[in-house]
Image: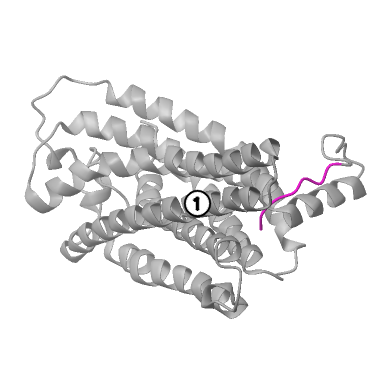
Amino acid sequence: MMVSNNSALFSSDCSTFNLGAVKVAVSYLFFIMFPVALLLNGVAAWVSFHLRSTTTFIVYLKNLVAADLLMTMTLPAIAASMLPEAAVELRVFACRYSYVIFYCCLYTSIALMGLISLDRFFKIVRPWGKMLGQNMAFSLVMSTLVWVVLFGFTVIPTIILTDQDPVNITDDFCMSLKSPAGLTLHKYVVLSMEILFWLVSILIVFCYICITLKVLQSYRNSGSNNSHGKKKTKLRVFLILLVFFMCFVPLHVMRIPFTLYEILGIDGCAQMWVIVHKLVLWVSTTNACLDPLLYIYLCREYRDKLVDMMKARGICVGLYSGKRAETSQ
């Protein structure tokens, strides 16, 4: 499920980078992110657990919270495995389990964000009638399908086929643990997930452009001159797209040349791509911190429940008291 750090995959006729120092720096970034992500997603899980699944949006939101929380739990092992003094057993554990589950949760989040965008499209652009996408059963089936497909067809086979004894401690350590069948599976999984990401990206852009145009058209048709409402709609869409593309695009742009190498044998600089991969992987992980903040902004039910639960425990919520802002669901 993971992108290989295999130095043998690329030609090494380029400037030497201090790869060890970069790995240590990035591992510290992961360590720093872990408590922040754990706190935010712990609160998100706490709130979503108390929300009734009365809408398709809430169903998707709960699954997204679960994916982000599970991804957060893999961060300590991933961070520790990057350190130069990491034990071989820890690196094997990270390669076989932590990285694989991390990437599965990452793509589960991406798929669910696509479903949330589609759900909002149906509710705002096509609100009339009973569309299939507006059905609660549909949301439950699609959420379950995402987990079953990603875990059943990528995580479990990858774990099973990462069964070789470690033969070295170089940058191709994870790939050296894979059997021949595991290496083949890895190539197809990487290519499939790359395609999934770009398809979801197209879907999200399409849905939110349509949503923005629909809302602005409603303002015009009603004769409203609510410039504040228009700005708020544009800002909401901008933030969603900004978070999605800021977190995920760097990783997937970086993976294009890597995937081309695996399929077509195109060469590149090994150490440069290892460094770039570590950095953009961390950037992608920031999504686990940003999603819980988006829930507050996008979902009124989530925000109201959070405020009520904080008030019940005597936590200051002056920032929100008396202001239950209007939001599209």
Residue 100 placement (x, y as % from top left): 38, 56
Magenta residues (range): 323-329
**Total marks in image:** 1
Give the vertical position of 38 relative to 66 (above or below): above
**Residue 131, quarter of the rendered image:** bottom right
**Residue 290, quarter of the rendered image:** top right
Judging depth in this view, the residue of 54 and 329 nearest the camera is 329
Judging depth in this view, the residue of 139 and 155 nearest the camera is 139
Q: Is residue 325 magenta?
A: yes
- Residue 318 shows in the view: yes
Residue 197 placement (x, y as % from top left): 35, 54
Q: Residues within 10 Å of mark 1 (few under 14, many from 20)?
A: many
Give the vertical position of 287 relative to 83 (above or below): below
Reading the image, the residue beneath label 1 is 208
Q: Is 270 positioned to the left or the right of 21 in the image? A: left
- The colour scheme is one colour
Residue 227 placement (x, y as % from top left): 67, 36
Judging depth in this view, the residue of 300 and 33 nearest the camera is 300
**Amino acid tagged 1:** Tyr
Q: Is residue 286 magenta?
A: no
**Residue 24, quarter of the rendered image:** top left
Residue shown at the point (87%, 35%) measured from the top left: 318
- Residue 102 shows in the view: no
For the C terminus, give its image quadrant: bottom right
For the N terminus, give its image quadrant: bottom left
